Image (cartoon, rainbow, N blue to C red):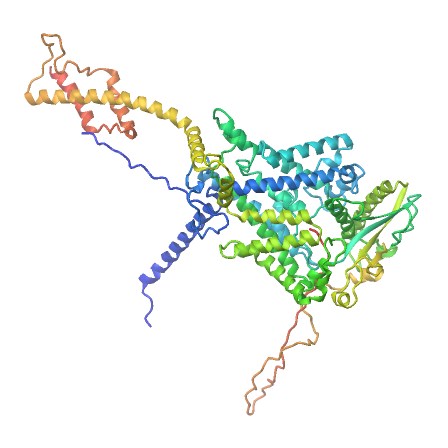
């Protein structure tokens, strides 16, 4: 076999570099499309309502025994809470909260009422741009104070609210949408406060972050289970449903059907481990999501964690396409021209275009006026040039006025007019306004004018 | 002569409508017609520079999402994996504040027994008589309690409190532990154990005071109760109530035995067994040496070569987080 030629060896490296470069660029484009391709907020709006409702319910339940959980003498009292979070009873953390410094029950109640109001506003979509991040902040402050009494519900509800806060989740199915349609006039701050029901990159970004976070949760949930013995020998499901403190529905009859509950155990383990891979392809996603409904529905019904089960099913809904929900909205509306219809959407989008181009319109008008002024000058120059050329061709140049007082060819030229001197440069700079460039030959025409004046 | 230069109007590429359930490798095939994403409205898509900055923040956030559970899983007797810890440290505070520092080990590695708290009223804080399992005991209360704690979410919060105390349990160190410092255990190891005990006592005392308020008594004593599940075979053969007293047991607050402290000096780090005949070894065929003639060749059969390894198991625990 002959040795590869030097030319081939040289070509191999650039080829590899070219492949790597195209792969890298394709990856960047894919990343950009994955995170920033605009999408509508329909799914996020439904998620907002469900998350807000769950947070509100959680805060209301807490209010039934508020001082027992966040009061100065709570189950974890203020001093212990500060020690646990501040580092005197363990490693210091950044999970800070000011609630463990408030001694007054009245102040704690006032804070909780504010939390309830803000959460309710977030749920119904009122001033969502403000109430969504505020609801997340108040939830975090409460979570850190509730150290010791938290579980999976608090995690998933917080994460859903956190990602919704960066999206225009109040663009539809909200009071904000109702206000936006009835608000006269347009301005930038109103457009921000009451976001339009159009596709945006922020909706996609929040959706993707929640989807990826769910994948991480299930991946590590599955891997953690894979380290145990009972999830492999199939008995984990039995020991979960036979736990008296969790039991809300007696399914202990499964003890007589080991084939069934061991199969369910293995299915749960593999579903959780492979969720992050199988939820993305079109053909496996419905199966994965149905499994999520089954698993979390089972947890909700049989293991007493109704809130956790509902919230996890809701979070999995982030994988539902927003246009499906939009079709349901249109099908549910009585009049075809109601909000959500194509005509209304087009109007809203045109309105947004007008708002965005307001500044550009001002500059456009200024440039148009300048264009008109320069065009007039150009026409004057061209007219004078034609006259001069005609005179040069005829071989004469007359400077006297005609008998009727009209200007003779050549006398209209004000060759020493300072305002004309910069005309060529101005015309050069107006090329983008269809004015056409003024080339070297025009400058030479000015030189001709000066020469003719000297000769005369 | 003027040149009518008209630069061709550059066409802005229209962004394609996005199917949020698909991976990015499957473009728009399933995008329904009329999806609003087809119109690139100015202001609805950040600029290229903004997208670049946002992408950096997104990567940082995703690290904060991924690394805490990764650190949880890579924690062993030597601590957390150094490669994971080195990347986690800079974003640890961010993850802690946003409540991202979770392990997501729900019912993992194995579903274990649940733990309750029982408290009985006491006259003075020095009254150390622990409560019994007798639910009829006067001036006593157990959490969680489905009968008195409703709705279910409130009951579950109390349940998590009892599990929290159990997870933080650290036995008290015996009086003679100082003698072991230096020759068996290090000062740092003792400090860690003592800090753990202080943490447990702080939480237990806080709960004890709360129990006293609930019982309307000057003080209270409390005890941890473990409620186990029956084995499914015995349950199938002889079903019993899940509230059967045989499934419950008090967990006494005893001191750490000195023997366990002595055992801390033994190597317990996971490593392959050395000098131990394995029981599941697989023999490796060794070729017969070629016969030699008149040489002092001392080569012989190398014998069987085998190796075995062991990995310390991880104890099971019931966890809601």
In which quarter of the view is residue A83 placed?
A: top right
- In the rendering, at what x and y percent does residue B198 appear? 81, 47
Query: Which residue is at 48% across, 51% downward?
Result: B22
Quarter of the rendering occupied by the C terminus of chain A: top left
Q: Is residue B71 visible?
A: no
Does B77 sit left or right of B118 as displayed? Answer: left
Q: Is A410 drawn above or below residue A216 in the view shown? A: above
- In the rendering, at what x and y percent does residue A87 appear? 73, 43
- In the rendering, at what x and y percent does residue A448 appear? 15, 22
The mark tally for this picture is 0
Q: Is B46 drawn above or below residue B249 in the view shown? A: above
Q: Is residue B170 visible?
A: yes
Farthest front residue?
Answer: A334
In which quarter of the view is residue A104 placed?
A: top right
Does A262 sit left or right of B17 as displayed? Answer: right
Does B210 sit left or right of B270 as displayed? Answer: right
- In the rendering, at what x and y percent does residue B170 appear? 80, 53
Q: Is B60 drawn above or below residue A439 in the view shown? A: below
Camera-nearest residue between B98 and B161: B161
Camera-nearest residue between B259 and A330: A330
Query: Which residue is at 63% across, 55% downward?
Result: A295
């Amino acid at each position: 076999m002959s040795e590869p030629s030097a030319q081939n060896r040289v070509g191999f490296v650039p080829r590899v570099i070219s492949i790597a470069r195209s792969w890298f660029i394709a990856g960047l484009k894919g990343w950009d499309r994955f995170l920033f391709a605009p999408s509508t907020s329909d799914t996020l709006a439904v998620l907002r309502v469900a998350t807000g409702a769950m947070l509100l319910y959680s805060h209301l339940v807490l209010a039934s025994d508020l001082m027992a959980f966040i009061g100065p003498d709570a189950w974890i009292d203020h001093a212990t809470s500060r020690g646990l979070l501040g580092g005197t009873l363990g490693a210091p953390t950044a999970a800070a909260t000011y609630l463990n410094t408030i001694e007054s029950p009245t102040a704690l109640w006032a804070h909780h009422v504010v939390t309830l109001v803000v959460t309710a506003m977030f749920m119904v979509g009122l001033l969502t741009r403000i109430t969504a991040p505020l609801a997340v902040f108040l939830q975090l402050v409460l979570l850190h104070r509730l150290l010791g009494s938290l579980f999976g519900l608090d995690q998933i509800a917080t994460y859903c609210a956190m990602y919704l806060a960066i999206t225009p989740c109040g663009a539809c199915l909200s009071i904000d949408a109702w206000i936006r349609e009835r608000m006269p006039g347009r301005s930038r701050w109103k457009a921000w406060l009451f976001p339009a029901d159009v596709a945006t990159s922020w909706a996609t970004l929040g959706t993707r972050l929640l989807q990826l976070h769910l994948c991480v949760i299930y991946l590590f949930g599955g891997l953690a289970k894979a380290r145990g013995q009972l999830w492999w020998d199939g008995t984990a499901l039995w020991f979960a449903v036979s736990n008296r403190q969790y039991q809300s529905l007696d399914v202990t009859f499964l003890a007589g059907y080991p084939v069934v509950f061991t199969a369910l155990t293995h299915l749960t383990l593999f579903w959780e481990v492979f969720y992050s891979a199988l939820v993305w392809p079109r053909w496996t996603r419905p199966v994965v999501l149905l499994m999520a409904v089954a698993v979390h529905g089972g947890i909700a019904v049989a293991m007493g964690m109704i809130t956790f089960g509902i919230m996890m099913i809701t979070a999995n809904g982030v994988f539902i396409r927003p246009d499906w929900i939009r079709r349901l909205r249109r099908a549910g509306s009585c009049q075809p021209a109601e909000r959500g219809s194509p005509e209304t959407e087009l109007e809203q989008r045109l309105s947004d275009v007008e708002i965005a181009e307001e500044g550009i319109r001002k500059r456009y008008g200024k440039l148009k006026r300048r264009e008109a002024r320069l065009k007039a000058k150009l026409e004057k120059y061209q007219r004078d040039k034609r006259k001069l050329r005609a005179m040069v061709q005829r071989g004469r140049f007359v400077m006297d006025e005609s008998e009727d007082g009209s200007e003779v060819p050549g006398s209209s030229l004000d060759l020493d007019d300072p305002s004309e001197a910069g005309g060529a440069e101005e015309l050069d700079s107006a090329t983008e306004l269809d004015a056409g460039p003024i080339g070297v030959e025009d400058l030479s025409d000015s030189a001709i004018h000066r020469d003719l004046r000297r000769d005369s | 002569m003027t040149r009518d230069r008209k630069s061709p109007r550059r066409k802005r590429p229209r962004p394609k409508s996005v199917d949020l359930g698909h991976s990015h490798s499957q473009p728009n095939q399933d995008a329904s017609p009329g999806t609003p994403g087809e119109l690139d409205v100015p202001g609805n898509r950040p600029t290229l520079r903004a997208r670049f900055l946002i992408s950096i923040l997104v990567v940082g956030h995703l690290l904060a999402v991924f690394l805490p559970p990764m650190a949880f899983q890579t924690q062993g007797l030597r601590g957390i994996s150094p490669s994971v810890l080195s990347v986690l440290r800079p974003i640890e505070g961010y993850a802690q504040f946003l409540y991202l520092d979770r392990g997501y080990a729900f019912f993992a590695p194995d579903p274990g027994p649940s733990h309750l708290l029982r408290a009985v009223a006491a006259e003075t804080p020095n009254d150390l008589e622990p409560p019994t399992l007798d639910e009829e005991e006067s001036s006593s209360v157990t959490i969680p309690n489905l009968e008195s704690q409703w709705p279910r979410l409130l009951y579950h919060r109390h349940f998590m409190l009892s599990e929290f105390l159990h997870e933080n349990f650290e036995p008290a160190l015996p009086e003679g532990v100082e003698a072991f410092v230096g020759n068996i255990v290090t000062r740092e190891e003792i400090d860690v154990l003592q800090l753990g005990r202080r943490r447990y006592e702080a939480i237990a005392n806080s709960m004890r005071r709360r129990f006293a308020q609930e019982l309307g008594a000057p003080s209270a004593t409390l005890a941890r109760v473990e409620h186990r599940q029956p084995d499914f075979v015995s349950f199938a053969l002889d079903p019993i109530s899940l509230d059967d007293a045989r499934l419950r047991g008090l967990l006494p607050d005893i001191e750490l035995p000195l023997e366990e402290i002595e055992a801390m000096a033994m190597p317990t780090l996971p490593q392959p067994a050395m000098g131990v005949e394995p029981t599941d070894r697989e023999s490796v065929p060794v070729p017969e040496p070629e016969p030699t003639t008149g040489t002092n060749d001392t080569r012989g059969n190398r014998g069987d070569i085998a190796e075995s390894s062991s990995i310390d198991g991880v104890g099971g625990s019931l966890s809601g987080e």
